[in-house]
Image: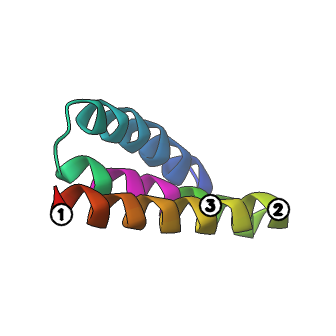
Amino acid sequence: MDLLTILEIISLITTLIGLYLLGEKRAPGFLIFTVSLACQMYIFYSNQFWFLFFQMIVLILFNLYNYRKWMRG
């Protein structure tokens, strides 16, 4: 099993867990979902899918913004 396959599996699992926790309005969901996005960024960068790579950057920024908004109440 190569590194990209392992990252795809990690990304899949962390996406599902992160989305579940976000749905339950729990703070760790933001962190876990960010880990998922970071794995996807590496996968897209390795395959030179630049549009998807930059899309993951935007999604991480949205995730961080929403976390700050959520923490303020």
Answer whether residue 47 is magenta in the image: no
Check disc 3 and report the residue beneath it. Answer: 56
Q: Secondary structure at mark 1?
A: helix
- Magenta segment's dominant SS is helix
User: Looking at the image, which residue is at 50% across and 50% down?
Assistant: 6
* Amino acid type of the residue tagged 3 in the rendering: Met
Q: Is residue 43 left or right of residue 23?
A: right
Task: State how far apart marks 2 and 1 are (Cα).
Answer: 32 Å
Element type at mark 2: helix
Tell me which segment is drawn in magenta: 31-38
Quadrant for residue 58, please give it. Answer: bottom right
Mark 2–mark 1 CB contact (< 8 Å):
no
Residue 51 marker: 2
Give percent across and percent down for residue 4.
61, 55
- Rounded to the nearest angstrom, the CA distance separating label 3 from label 2 is 9 Å
Q: Is residue 9 left or right of residue 71?
A: right
Residue 23 figure quarter: top left
